[in-house]
């Protein structure tokens, strides 16, 4: 079955500390992989995406993610977290050949301590 | 600017009533999607449409209906058959690998 797992429901980090949000997927075809961020009551903003090529992907706001096929993972990282990064983060997987549908993880809520 | 407009932002419905959520895009995208978001459950696909006058059920289509009469519009009707409609609803569109999301409609049953 196709699925996305974000093992951490809630993470708290101190401002200036590094961050890693985990994402594991199960998908039959070669997937497209995405990370989105959502502020309360808002839509989703794309942070970065991976389709092919270099497995280390750079995104907006200083985020990056690394695709590891052998581990079926696409973890999101940021070297130094800012208070404005507090939000909910979603990992998603999809394929244009699957009707373009995205399958989302349950989300990880990030809190930032001053 | 191109984008997706969802309206209204907040919607209240009495039990037993149908209600329609609007989603309009001016991105000229072929595909459109409706997702439902509940706390701790991520986003779940309700319906999607890859072309005008055609749409498919997603994972949780029961109690919902859609239409796609125009490329720009993909309204979602939440019917009285939907037992737990209180949720945040997100519309999205895509062309190939690019997805755009609306800002959502929060539906509350009162």
Image (tube, coloured by chain):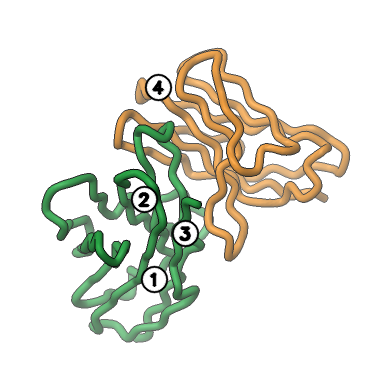
Task: Tell me the quarter of the image containing the C terminus of chain A.
Answer: bottom left
Q: Residue at x 78, y 34 (%)?
A: B79
Q: Position of residue A67 (x, y in %)?
A: 23, 60
Which label sits in the foreground, 4 or 2?
Answer: 4
Q: Position of residue A95 (x, y in %)?
A: 36, 39
Identify the disc placed on residue A45: 2
Identify the disc placed on residue A71: none
Please state the chain letter of the residue tagged with numbered disc 2 in the rendered image.
A
Colour green, chain: A
Identify the disc placed on residue B30: 4
For mark 4, give the secondary structure.
Answer: loop
Which label sits in the foreground, 2 or 3?
Answer: 3
Colour orange, chain: B
Judge the density around disc 4: few (<14), some (14-19), many (≥20) Cα neighbours within 10 Å. Answer: some
**How far apart in space, not on screen, are marks 4 and 2 (Cα)?**
20 Å
**Which one is in front, A44 or B11?**
A44
**Which one is in front, A99 or B72?**
A99
Residue denoted by label 3: A105
Q: Position of residue B13 (x, y in %)?
A: 79, 42
Q: Is residue B85 left or right of residue B24?
A: right
**How far apart in space, not on screen, are marks 2 and 3 (Cα)?**
15 Å
Judge the density around disc 3: few (<14), some (14-19), many (≥20) Cα neighbours within 10 Å. Answer: many
Q: Which is more N-terminal, label 1 or label 2? A: 2
Residue denoted by label 1: A86
Q: Is residue A59 left or right of residue A83?
A: left
Q: Determine whether A14 is above or below A25 in the image.
A: below
Among the 4 quarters of the image, the one containing residue B99? top left
**Which one is in front, A36 or B17?**
A36
């Amino acid at each position: 079955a196709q699925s996305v797992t974000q093992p951490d429901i809630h993470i708290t980090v101190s401002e200036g500390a590094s961050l890693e949000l985990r994402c594991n997927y199960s998908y039959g075809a070669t997937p497209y992989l995405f990370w989105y961020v959502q502020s309360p009551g808002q839509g989703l903003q794309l942070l970065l995406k991976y389709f092919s090529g270099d497995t280390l992907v750079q995104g907006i706001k200083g985020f990056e993610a690394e695709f590891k096929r052998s581990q079926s993972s696409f973890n999101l990282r940021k070297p130094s977290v800012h208070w404005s990064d507090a939000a909910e983060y979603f990992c998603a997987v999809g394929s244009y050949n699957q009707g373009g549908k995205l399958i989302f993880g349950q989300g990880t809520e990030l809190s930032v301590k001053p | 600017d191109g984008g997706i407009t969802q309206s209204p932002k907040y919607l209240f419905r009495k039990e037993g009533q149908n209600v329609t959520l609007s989603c309009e895009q001016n991105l000229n995208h072929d595909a459109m999607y409706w997702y439902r978001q509940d706390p701790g459950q991520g986003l779940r696909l309700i319906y999607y449409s890859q072309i005008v006058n055609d749409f498919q059920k997603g994972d949780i289509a029961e109690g919902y209906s859609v239409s796609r009469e125009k490329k720009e519009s993909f309204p979602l009707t939440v019917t009285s058959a939907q037992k737990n409609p209180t949720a945040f609803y997100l519309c999205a569109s895509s062309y190939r690998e690019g997805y755009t999301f609306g800002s959502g409609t929060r539906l509350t049953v009162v």
